[in-house]
């Protein structure tokens, strides 16, 4: 019994240590296990959303995505919430995504002319009849893969970043600054005062104007652009 108690104590200690450490870990882009009958793939450049059933394409829809200044977040996410009638701008249905730095989702629109264009604030817009069909098909927990590069469309310049911006590119900048010893906060994709201060210290050491703005020169000095 003494030996059993000792092993139990060690196990509990290890588990509690892991829990404590996880609290202080930086969040990362959600990478979800490949499970479930359905999966969604989003191709922003092509303005296309594909539904797959057990790996086979069963539906395809035209969509609108974020403009270059408010891009649709690249990465792997999950549908975490489904709702109805959020307001005219969101159409009759909403499928929410677990993006760490904001409220993003797949929804309808009162601007059907925007479908096929980069005109949203980051969400994925669908025609109302299409999003209603998708809503009935897709369960909560479905994986959603948004393809592309975290720094945006390679055919366009990277966006300048400043305090108030959010996104995967902000999270990438925070991670690089943290690795270089300038940033001590949480890499959460939210450009706040602490990120700006860390950036200014980096700019000073690199003899760049200390304006707290991530410009093409900053991307280059951080090794993100050639």
Image (cartoon, rainbow, N blue to C red):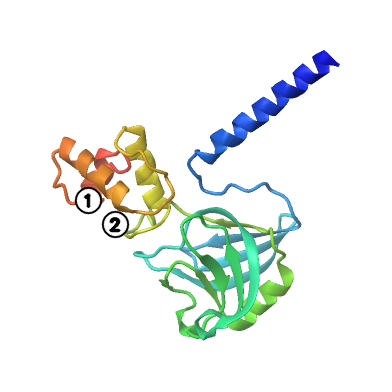
- Snapshot quadrant of residue 172: top left
Q: Nearer the viewer, residue 165 or 49?
A: 165
Residue 177 is situated, as x and y percent measured from the top left of the image, at 32, 39
Q: Residue at x 46, y 57 (%)?
A: 101
For disc 2, the neighbor class at 10 Å (few under 14, some 14 to 19, many from 20) is some
- Contact, CB < 8 Å: mark 1 with mark 2? yes
**Disc 1 from disc 2: Cα separation:** 8 Å
**Is residue 54 rendered to the left or right of residue 69?**
right
> Depth check: 65 or 170 in front?
170
Where's residue 187, x and y in %? 42, 45
- Please give left or right for residue 225 compared with residue 70 in the image: left
> Dot 2: what SS?
loop
Q: Which quadrant is the N terminus positioned in?
A: top right
Residue 131's tag is none
Indicate whether 211 appears above or below 113.
Answer: above
Left or right: residue 56 versus residue 225 is right
Write the residue at 35% across / 37% down: 178
Question: For this view, does 11 lie left or right of residue 171?
Answer: right
Find residue 23 and report its horizontal and vertical position in percent. 54, 40
Q: Which mark is residue 212?
A: 1
Please name the residue that numbered disc 2 is placed on. 163
Please tell me whether mark 1 sits on a helix, a strand or a loop: loop
Residue drawn at (47%, 84%), measured in percent from left and top?
111
| Residue at far top of view | 3
Q: Quadrant of the C terminus?
A: top left
What x and y, as percent, mark residue 62? 55, 73
Q: Earlier in the sequence, mark 1 or mark 2?
A: 2
The residue carrying pointer 1 sits among few (fewer than 14), some (14 to 19) or many (20 or more) residues within 10 Å by Cα, namely some
Q: Residue at x 69, y 63 (%)?
A: 140
Image quadrant assignment for residue 61: bottom right
Vertical side of 226 occupied by 111: above or below: below
Q: How many marks?
A: 2
């Amino acid at each position: 019994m003494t030996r059993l108690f000792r092993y139990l104590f060690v196990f509990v200690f290890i588990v509690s240590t892991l829990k404590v450490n996880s609290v202080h870990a930086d969040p990362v882009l959600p990478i979800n296990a490949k499970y479930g009958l359905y999966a969604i793939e989003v191709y922003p450049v092509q303005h296309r959303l594909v539904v797959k059933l057990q790996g086979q394409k069963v539906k395809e829809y035209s969509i609108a995505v974020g403009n270059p200044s408010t891009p649709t977040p690249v990465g792997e996410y999950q549908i975490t919430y489904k709702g109805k009638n959020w307001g005219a701008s969101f159409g009759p249905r909403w499928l929410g995504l677990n993006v760490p730095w904001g409220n993003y989702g797949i929804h309808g629109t009162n601007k059907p002319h925007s479908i096929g264009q980069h005109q949203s604030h980051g969400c994925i817009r669908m025609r109302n009849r299409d999003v209603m069909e998708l809503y009935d098909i897709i369960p909560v927990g479905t994986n959603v893969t948004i393809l592309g590069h975290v720094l945006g469309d390679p055919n366009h310049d990277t966006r300048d970043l400043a305090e108030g911006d959010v996104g995967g590119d902000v999270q990438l900048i925070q991670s690089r600054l943290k690795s270089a010893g300038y940033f001590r906060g949480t890499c959460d994709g939210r450009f706040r005062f602490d990120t700006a201060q860390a950036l200014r210290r980096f700019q000073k050491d690199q003899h760049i104007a200390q304006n707290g703005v991530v410009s093409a020169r900053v991307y280059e000095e951080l090794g993100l652009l050639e």
